[in-house]
Structures are given as structure tokens and as C-alpha cells.
Amino acid sequence: MSLQGKVGMELKTFTFEIEKGKIREFALAIGDNHPSYESGESLPPTFATVMEMWGGADFFEIIERLELDITNVLHGEQEYIYLGKIKVGDKVTGITKVKDVLNKKHLDIYKLETHFKNEAGETVLISKNTVIERQ
């Protein structure tokens, strides 16, 4: 498949339930002991990483679906845009799409976006991810 043919490709839809224990585990892992994370009142800003890693397409599925050479792949960038409140007990559904693919010199650059919706169907978070493959 051509690079531009991958634009619009969707990875599997997934649902992730926000658990207090996962918030605490993540806060401990990043060394942030903010009381609101311990109590589950709020999420660390990069908690979406947990949502994608535990609920979404795993690294190997992404590599396979995009037909990448795993030995030449690196993670280039990550951005989270919070549009609404996410709290313990919420079930959010994520869908990841390839938004763009660029070729610069000997690099193929894949721009992925995951849109997370709450149970009311409102988009509460967008995760933007860049995957780079050296050619």
C-alpha cells in the first residue's frame, strides 16, 4: 500500500474504564504524588498513555497494520488535548486513525490521532502521536 493510501486507516476501536488504581500506579511510575491522583479526583496530564497502552492497539499491531520495519521505527512526538472532564468510573471509547503520512528525505512520518469519547458520545480527549520510520 502506498504511503498516502494509509491516510484515513483506522485501528481497532477500544473501550477503557478509568480505574482509581491505574491512576495511582501511573502517578507512582512517573514520580508524581499529587494528592488528587492518589484519591482519583484527577488524572495526571499524560494518563492517556495508560489508556492507549492498556486499551488501544499495541505497538506490534500498529507496526503490522502500517507495514513498518520494526527495526527502523521510533516514537517521534506525543500530544494530549483535553476537551472535557474524565474521572474514575468513566468508560471512554477510543478510535485511532492515520491522519497524515509525510516523506522527508529518508523518513516516513505517520501522524496518528486517537479520539476518546465518553459514554454520552462527547469527545473528551484527543491524543496525537507521531511514528517515524527510517528508510
Image: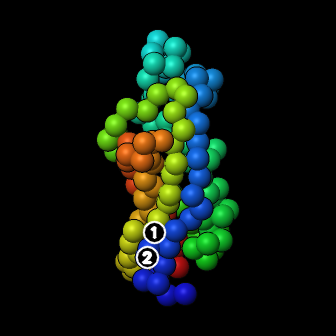
Visible in this render: residue 16? yes
Q: Is residue 69 above or below residue 89?
A: below
Pointer 1: what residue? 98
Tell me which amino acid carries mark 2. Answer: Val
Residue drawn 59% across the image and 52% down it: 14
Q: Is residue 21 above or below residue 72?
A: above
- Could you classify mark 1 by the number of other residues whose Cα lies within 10 Å: few (under 14), some (14-19), or many (20 or more)? many
Instruction: Residue 134: give x, y in percent of width and height.
Output: 52, 73
Instruction: Residue 95: give x, y in percent of width and height.
Output: 50, 57
Kindly indicate whether the residue at mark 1 contacts the one at mark 2 (C-beta within 8 angstroms). yes
Instruction: Residue 102: give x, y in percent of width and height.
Output: 38, 76
User: Which of the two labelled residues, at mark 2 and mark 1, occupies the earlier sequence position?
Assistant: 2
Tell me which amino acid carries mark 1. Answer: Val
| Left-right relation of 11 to 42 | right
Residue drawn 59% across the image and 62% down it: 12
Query: How many callouts does the rendering have?
Result: 2
Pointer 2: what residue? 7
Quadrant (top left, top right, bottom left, bottom right) of the N terminus: bottom right
Q: Secondary structure at mark 2?
A: loop
